[in-house]
Amino acid sequence: MSTLRTWCTFKLPGRFTATRLISSAHSVSVNNILACVKIPKHFCAESERIQRHSKPGNMAESTESPAVMNGSSASVGPDYCEIIVVRHGETPWNVQGKVQGQLDVELNEVGREQAVSVAERLAKEFKISVIYSSDLKRALETAQTIANRCGGLKVIEDPELRERHLGDLQGLVFREAAKVCPIAYQAFLSGKTDQDIPGGGESLDQLYRRCTSALQRIARKHIGERIVVVTHGGVIRTLYQRACPNKKPEGFLKSGFGGDSTSG
Protein backbone atom coordinates (compact mmCIF):
# COMPACT_ATOMS: atom_id res chain seq x y z
CA MET A 1 0.00 0.00 0.00
CA SER A 2 1.25 3.48 -0.82
CA THR A 3 2.20 5.86 1.95
CA LEU A 4 3.23 9.47 2.22
CA ARG A 5 6.37 10.56 0.49
CA THR A 6 6.66 14.16 1.58
CA TRP A 7 5.77 15.88 4.81
CA CYS A 8 5.93 19.65 4.94
CA THR A 9 5.43 21.65 8.12
CA PHE A 10 4.44 25.29 8.27
CA LYS A 11 4.12 27.55 11.28
CA LEU A 12 2.56 31.00 11.28
CA PRO A 13 3.72 33.40 14.02
CA GLY A 14 1.85 36.28 12.36
CA ARG A 15 2.72 35.43 8.77
CA PHE A 16 3.14 32.30 6.71
CA THR A 17 6.53 30.75 7.46
CA ALA A 18 7.72 27.26 6.62
CA THR A 19 9.90 24.98 8.70
CA ARG A 20 11.25 22.31 6.38
CA LEU A 21 10.44 19.50 3.98
CA ILE A 22 10.97 15.91 5.00
CA SER A 23 11.06 12.97 2.59
CA SER A 24 10.26 9.52 3.89
CA ALA A 25 12.05 6.37 2.81
CA HIS A 26 8.97 5.02 1.07
CA SER A 27 9.07 4.74 -2.71
CA VAL A 28 5.83 6.41 -3.74
CA SER A 29 4.90 8.66 -6.65
CA VAL A 30 4.74 12.36 -5.82
CA ASN A 31 1.01 12.68 -5.25
CA ASN A 32 0.48 13.35 -1.57
CA ILE A 33 1.85 16.02 0.72
CA LEU A 34 0.90 17.09 4.21
CA ALA A 35 1.57 20.51 5.61
CA CYS A 36 0.76 21.73 9.07
CA VAL A 37 -0.24 25.38 9.18
CA LYS A 38 -0.77 27.25 12.44
CA ILE A 39 -2.73 30.46 11.94
CA PRO A 40 -2.88 32.74 15.01
CA LYS A 41 -6.21 34.29 15.98
CA HIS A 42 -5.01 37.86 15.52
CA PHE A 43 -3.73 37.03 12.04
CA CYS A 44 -7.09 35.58 11.00
CA ALA A 45 -8.87 38.69 12.23
CA GLU A 46 -6.65 41.05 10.29
CA SER A 47 -7.78 42.58 7.04
CA GLU A 48 -4.36 41.89 5.59
CA ARG A 49 -3.41 42.93 2.11
CA ILE A 50 -2.14 39.79 0.43
CA GLN A 51 1.10 40.39 -1.42
CA ARG A 52 3.03 37.92 -3.50
CA HIS A 53 6.43 39.18 -2.42
CA SER A 54 7.04 39.90 1.26
CA LYS A 55 10.02 41.75 2.64
CA PRO A 56 12.66 39.60 4.35
CA GLY A 57 11.84 41.21 7.68
CA ASN A 58 8.30 39.87 7.55
CA MET A 59 9.43 36.30 7.92
CA ALA A 60 9.66 35.05 11.47
CA GLU A 61 12.32 32.58 12.46
CA SER A 62 11.40 29.04 11.37
CA THR A 63 10.96 26.44 14.06
CA GLU A 64 9.79 22.85 13.98
CA SER A 65 6.32 22.09 15.28
CA PRO A 66 6.66 19.33 17.91
CA ALA A 67 3.07 18.21 17.45
CA VAL A 68 3.67 17.59 13.77
CA MET A 69 7.20 16.26 13.89
CA ASN A 70 6.42 13.78 16.65
CA GLY A 71 3.04 12.75 15.30
CA SER A 72 1.34 14.07 18.42
CA SER A 73 -2.40 14.60 18.69
CA ALA A 74 -1.82 17.35 21.26
CA SER A 75 -4.67 19.81 21.54
CA VAL A 76 -4.61 23.03 19.55
CA GLY A 77 -4.12 26.31 21.41
CA PRO A 78 -7.07 28.69 21.83
CA ASP A 79 -5.44 31.48 19.83
CA TYR A 80 -4.83 29.81 16.48
CA CYS A 81 -6.21 27.37 13.93
CA GLU A 82 -4.01 24.49 12.85
CA ILE A 83 -4.52 23.34 9.26
CA ILE A 84 -3.13 20.12 7.82
CA VAL A 85 -2.94 20.46 4.04
CA VAL A 86 -3.15 17.29 1.94
CA ARG A 87 -2.67 16.80 -1.77
CA HIS A 88 -5.10 14.51 -3.60
CA GLY A 89 -4.03 11.04 -4.71
CA GLU A 90 -2.79 10.00 -8.12
CA THR A 91 -5.05 10.12 -11.19
CA PRO A 92 -4.83 8.45 -14.62
CA TRP A 93 -3.89 11.82 -16.09
CA ASN A 94 -0.97 12.16 -13.67
CA VAL A 95 0.35 8.90 -15.06
CA GLN A 96 -0.25 9.94 -18.68
CA GLY A 97 1.33 13.37 -18.21
CA LYS A 98 -1.89 15.18 -19.11
CA VAL A 99 -2.58 18.69 -17.81
CA GLN A 100 -5.59 18.59 -15.50
CA GLY A 101 -5.97 22.08 -14.08
CA GLN A 102 -9.65 22.41 -13.18
CA LEU A 103 -10.87 19.52 -15.34
CA ASP A 104 -12.63 16.95 -13.17
CA VAL A 105 -10.58 13.73 -13.20
CA GLU A 106 -11.10 10.88 -10.75
CA LEU A 107 -8.46 9.02 -8.77
CA ASN A 108 -6.94 5.80 -10.08
CA GLU A 109 -6.39 2.74 -7.88
CA VAL A 110 -2.96 3.94 -6.76
CA GLY A 111 -4.50 7.28 -5.82
CA ARG A 112 -7.17 5.54 -3.77
CA GLU A 113 -4.50 3.56 -1.93
CA GLN A 114 -2.63 6.78 -1.24
CA ALA A 115 -5.80 8.38 0.11
CA VAL A 116 -6.32 5.43 2.46
CA SER A 117 -2.71 5.64 3.62
CA VAL A 118 -3.02 9.35 4.39
CA ALA A 119 -6.34 8.79 6.12
CA GLU A 120 -4.96 6.04 8.35
CA ARG A 121 -2.04 8.17 9.42
CA LEU A 122 -4.22 11.17 10.18
CA ALA A 123 -6.71 9.04 12.11
CA LYS A 124 -3.89 7.56 14.18
CA GLU A 125 -1.91 10.69 14.92
CA PHE A 126 -4.29 13.66 15.00
CA LYS A 127 -7.62 14.76 16.39
CA ILE A 128 -9.37 16.60 13.56
CA SER A 129 -12.56 18.66 13.73
CA VAL A 130 -13.59 19.06 10.11
CA ILE A 131 -12.32 18.62 6.55
CA TYR A 132 -12.40 21.16 3.74
CA SER A 133 -11.84 20.09 0.16
CA SER A 134 -11.63 21.33 -3.38
CA ASP A 135 -14.84 20.31 -5.12
CA LEU A 136 -12.94 18.49 -7.89
CA LYS A 137 -13.42 14.70 -7.76
CA ARG A 138 -9.79 13.76 -7.17
CA ALA A 139 -9.58 15.97 -4.08
CA LEU A 140 -13.10 15.27 -2.85
CA GLU A 141 -12.65 11.49 -2.94
CA THR A 142 -9.38 11.86 -1.03
CA ALA A 143 -11.17 14.05 1.53
CA GLN A 144 -14.07 11.63 1.92
CA THR A 145 -11.66 8.74 2.48
CA ILE A 146 -9.99 10.73 5.24
CA ALA A 147 -13.34 11.69 6.74
CA ASN A 148 -14.50 8.07 6.88
CA ARG A 149 -11.29 6.88 8.56
CA CYS A 150 -11.42 9.74 11.07
CA GLY A 151 -14.82 8.86 12.47
CA GLY A 152 -17.20 10.17 9.84
CA LEU A 153 -16.12 13.81 9.82
CA LYS A 154 -17.96 16.41 7.78
CA VAL A 155 -16.44 17.35 4.41
CA ILE A 156 -17.09 20.91 3.25
CA GLU A 157 -16.58 21.53 -0.47
CA ASP A 158 -14.89 24.79 -1.38
CA PRO A 159 -14.26 25.69 -5.05
CA GLU A 160 -11.68 28.27 -3.96
CA LEU A 161 -9.39 25.33 -3.16
CA ARG A 162 -9.34 24.14 -6.78
CA GLU A 163 -6.16 23.72 -8.79
CA ARG A 164 -4.96 26.58 -10.96
CA HIS A 165 -7.03 26.97 -14.13
CA LEU A 166 -4.59 26.33 -16.97
CA GLY A 167 -6.70 27.54 -19.87
CA ASP A 168 -6.06 26.00 -23.28
CA LEU A 169 -3.45 23.63 -21.82
CA GLN A 170 -6.06 21.66 -19.90
CA GLY A 171 -6.55 18.18 -21.32
CA LEU A 172 -3.33 18.24 -23.34
CA VAL A 173 -0.37 15.92 -22.89
CA PHE A 174 2.18 18.37 -21.53
CA ARG A 175 5.08 17.23 -23.72
CA GLU A 176 2.92 17.94 -26.80
CA ALA A 177 1.53 21.28 -25.60
CA ALA A 178 4.25 23.39 -27.24
CA LYS A 179 3.13 22.20 -30.67
CA VAL A 180 -0.62 22.10 -30.06
CA CYS A 181 -1.03 25.40 -28.17
CA PRO A 182 2.25 27.35 -28.47
CA ILE A 183 0.83 30.66 -27.18
CA ALA A 184 -0.66 29.11 -24.04
CA TYR A 185 2.49 27.04 -23.53
CA GLN A 186 4.73 30.08 -23.69
CA ALA A 187 2.42 31.96 -21.33
CA PHE A 188 2.71 29.10 -18.83
CA LEU A 189 6.50 29.12 -19.05
CA SER A 190 6.90 32.90 -19.07
CA GLY A 191 7.75 33.18 -15.39
CA LYS A 192 5.66 36.35 -15.10
CA THR A 193 3.39 36.17 -12.08
CA ASP A 194 0.77 38.39 -13.69
CA GLN A 195 0.66 36.39 -16.94
CA ASP A 196 -2.64 34.60 -17.42
CA ILE A 197 -3.05 31.67 -19.81
CA PRO A 198 -5.20 31.95 -22.94
CA GLY A 199 -8.47 30.07 -22.65
CA GLY A 200 -9.49 31.39 -19.24
CA GLY A 201 -6.38 30.35 -17.36
CA GLU A 202 -5.26 32.02 -14.15
CA SER A 203 -2.06 33.92 -13.56
CA LEU A 204 0.12 32.91 -10.63
CA ASP A 205 -0.93 36.11 -8.86
CA GLN A 206 -4.60 35.20 -9.24
CA LEU A 207 -3.96 31.71 -7.90
CA TYR A 208 -1.99 33.18 -5.01
CA ARG A 209 -4.75 35.57 -3.99
CA ARG A 210 -7.43 32.91 -4.29
CA CYS A 211 -5.84 30.13 -2.27
CA THR A 212 -4.23 32.24 0.47
CA SER A 213 -7.48 34.15 0.99
CA ALA A 214 -9.37 30.85 1.19
CA LEU A 215 -7.01 29.53 3.85
CA GLN A 216 -7.44 32.65 5.98
CA ARG A 217 -11.21 32.58 5.57
CA ILE A 218 -11.37 28.95 6.64
CA ALA A 219 -9.06 29.56 9.60
CA ARG A 220 -11.24 32.38 10.93
CA LYS A 221 -14.09 29.88 11.35
CA HIS A 222 -12.04 27.35 13.31
CA ILE A 223 -9.91 29.11 15.92
CA GLY A 224 -8.81 26.59 18.53
CA GLU A 225 -9.32 23.63 16.17
CA ARG A 226 -7.21 21.35 13.98
CA ILE A 227 -8.67 20.83 10.53
CA VAL A 228 -7.68 19.24 7.23
CA VAL A 229 -7.67 20.94 3.83
CA VAL A 230 -7.48 18.68 0.76
CA THR A 231 -6.32 20.49 -2.35
CA HIS A 232 -3.92 20.36 -5.32
CA GLY A 233 -0.23 20.64 -6.11
CA GLY A 234 -0.29 24.15 -7.53
CA VAL A 235 -2.16 25.44 -4.48
CA ILE A 236 0.28 23.81 -2.06
CA ARG A 237 3.24 25.20 -3.96
CA THR A 238 1.69 28.66 -3.76
CA LEU A 239 1.21 28.38 0.00
CA TYR A 240 4.85 27.38 0.31
CA GLN A 241 5.87 30.42 -1.73
CA ARG A 242 3.96 32.64 0.65
CA ALA A 243 5.62 30.91 3.57
CA CYS A 244 9.08 31.35 2.04
CA PRO A 245 8.94 34.34 -0.35
CA ASN A 246 12.72 34.50 -0.56
CA LYS A 247 13.34 30.79 -1.01
CA LYS A 248 12.84 28.81 -4.20
CA PRO A 249 10.84 25.57 -3.92
CA GLU A 250 13.07 22.54 -3.72
CA GLY A 251 12.72 18.84 -4.39
CA PHE A 252 9.17 17.68 -4.92
CA LEU A 253 7.70 21.15 -4.60
CA LYS A 254 9.84 22.26 -7.52
CA SER A 255 9.28 19.30 -9.80
CA GLY A 256 5.90 17.94 -8.88
CA PHE A 257 3.72 20.71 -7.55
CA GLY A 258 3.81 23.50 -10.08
CA GLY A 259 0.48 23.00 -11.82
CA ASP A 260 2.29 21.21 -14.64
CA SER A 261 1.97 17.76 -16.22
CA THR A 262 2.57 15.98 -12.92
CA SER A 263 0.37 18.23 -10.83
CA GLY A 264 -3.25 19.11 -10.45
Image (cartoon, rainbow, N blue to C red):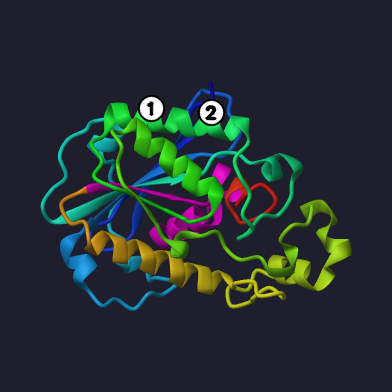
Magenta residues, start to end: 226-254
Residue at the image point whose x is 57% and y is 43% from the top: 252
Does label 2 or label 1 sit earlier along the sequence?
2
Farthest residue toward the top? 1
Q: Is residue 5 among the parts visible in the rendering?
A: no
The residue indicated by pointer 1 is: 120
Q: Seen in the image, is 91 located left or right of residue 145? A: right
Say what amino acid the circle numbered 2 marks.
Answer: Glu
Q: Which mark is residue 113?
A: 2
Say which quarter of the image contains residue 122: top left
Q: Which residue is nearer to you in this view: 41 or 122? A: 122
Residue at position x 27%, y 56% in the image: 12
Residue 20 in view, yes or no? yes
Residue 131 x/y as whole percent: 34, 48
Magenta highlight on residue 251:
yes
Q: In what element is the residue under mark 1?
A: helix
Which residue: 55% across, 56% down?
A: 234
**In the figure, 88 relative to 242: above or below?**
above
Above or below, comparing residue 262 to residue 117 in the picture:
below
SS of the residue at dot 2? helix
